[in-house]
């Protein structure tokens, strides 16, 4: 379920960011490009969350 929510949030956020950045730079909005970026972003988020440890690291002084 967390993978589905990760993709949904990345899809919405990348669509919004693509539209806003395109409007600010004067370029056209490209739905396909923003969708591909959202897939890449969701894969990166999933990989980063898998690599990071869940438990806090003990500090030795």
Image (cartoon, grey):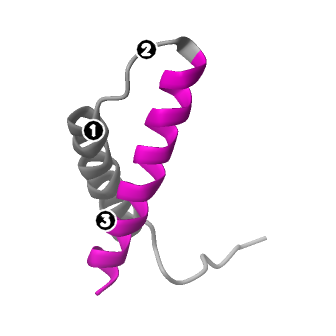
Label 3 secondary element? helix
Residue 16 to residue 27: above or below: below
- Quarter of the image for the C terminus: give it: bottom right
Q: Nearer the viewer, mark 3 or mark 2?
A: 2
Q: Residue furthest top?
A: 26
Disc nearer the start of the sequence (1/3)? 3
Residue 47 lies left or right of residue 55; in this view the side is left
Label 2 secondary element? loop
Mark 3, residue position: 7
Label 1 secondary element? helix
Q: Nearer the viewer, residue 19 or 9?
A: 19
Mark 2, residue position: 27
Mark 1, residue position: 31
**C-alpha gap between disc 1 and disc 3:** 15 Å
- Does 59 appear in magenta? no
| Residue range of the region highlighted in magenta in the rendering | 1-24
Residue at left offset 30%, top offset 60%: 47
Residue 15 to residue 22: above or below: below
**C-alpha gap between disc 2 and disc 1:** 13 Å
Residue at left offset 26%, top offset 45%: 35
Residue at left offset 42%, top offset 46%: 14
Residue 7 occupies quadrant: bottom left
Q: Are marks 2 and 1 in contact (CB under 8 Å)?
A: no
Residue 17 lies left or right of residue 39; in this view the side is right
> Percent from the top left, x then y, of residue 6?
36, 69
Dot 1, crowdedness within 10 Å: few (<14), some or many (≥20)?
Answer: few
Q: Nearer the viewer, mark 1 or mark 3?
A: 1
């Amino acid at each position: 379920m967390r993978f589905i929510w990760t993709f949904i949030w990345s899809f919405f956020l990348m669509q919004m960011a693509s539209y806003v950045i395109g409007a600010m730079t004067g370029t056209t909005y490209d739905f396909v490009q923003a969708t591909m970026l959202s897939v890449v972003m969701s894969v990166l988020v999933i990989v980063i969350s898998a690599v990071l440890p869940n438990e806090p690291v003990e500090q030795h002084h």
